[in-house]
Image: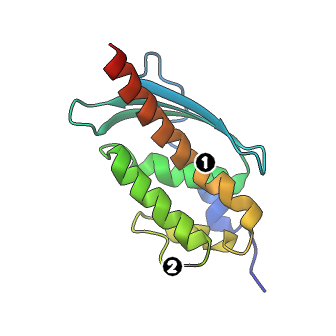
Amino acid sequence: MSGALYTREILRLAVSIPHQQRLDNPDGTAELRSKTCGSKVAADVMIKDSGELQDLGLEISACALGQASAAILGAQAIGKTAGDIGTVRDNLAVFLEGSSESPGEWPDMDKLAAARDHKGRHAAILLPYDAVIAAFTDAAARKQAA
């Protein structure tokens, strides 16, 4: 039997999301909604010429697990590429589904272990990563169109 889903660590992270503001003129933007739980994440990105994330803006409407996941992402994403964030997201997804014992190397990722047995919450946890990756994709499309 699994332990408490909303642990003290999850709740601490949920109230400490960095970059909780939309950017004025982002290079890329995306708004995604989870079909399974209704969580919504909007992400704005500013990208360096080198392809690394320079600035991030997030707007989160999600459960505490989605908020905690966004806090982990927000604390680590600056300076990362879309590929870096995609790798972290994929490692987290494999961990949540039970195929890996490690959620990844970013600080606090292990706090999400409480959600492994709650498959209905996995989409909310992955949504912030998906939104940031989609915003990177939007930035690349805008740059190519210019």
* 10 vs 121, nearest the viewer: 121
Residue under pointer 2: 100
Amino acid carrying label 2: it is Ser
Identify the disc placed on residue 127: 1
Name the residue located 76 percent from the left edge and 45 percent from the top edge. 35
Q: Secondary structure at mark 1?
A: helix
* Above-or-below relation of 29 to 41: above
Name the residue located 47 percent from the left edge and 16 percent from the top edge. 24
Which quarter of the image is occupied by the N terminus? bottom right
Judged left or right of residue 116, residue 84 is left
Distance between mark 2 and mark 1 Cα atoms: 20 Å
Q: Residues within 10 Å of mark 1 (few under 14, many from 20)?
A: many
The percent position of residue 44, horizontal first and vertical second, equals 48, 29
Q: Secondary structure at mark 2?
A: loop
The percent position of residue 118, horizontal first and vertical second, equals 75, 69
Q: For residue 104, say whether it is visible.
A: yes
Identify the disc placed on residue 91: none
The percent position of residue 27, horizontal first and vertical second, equals 39, 23
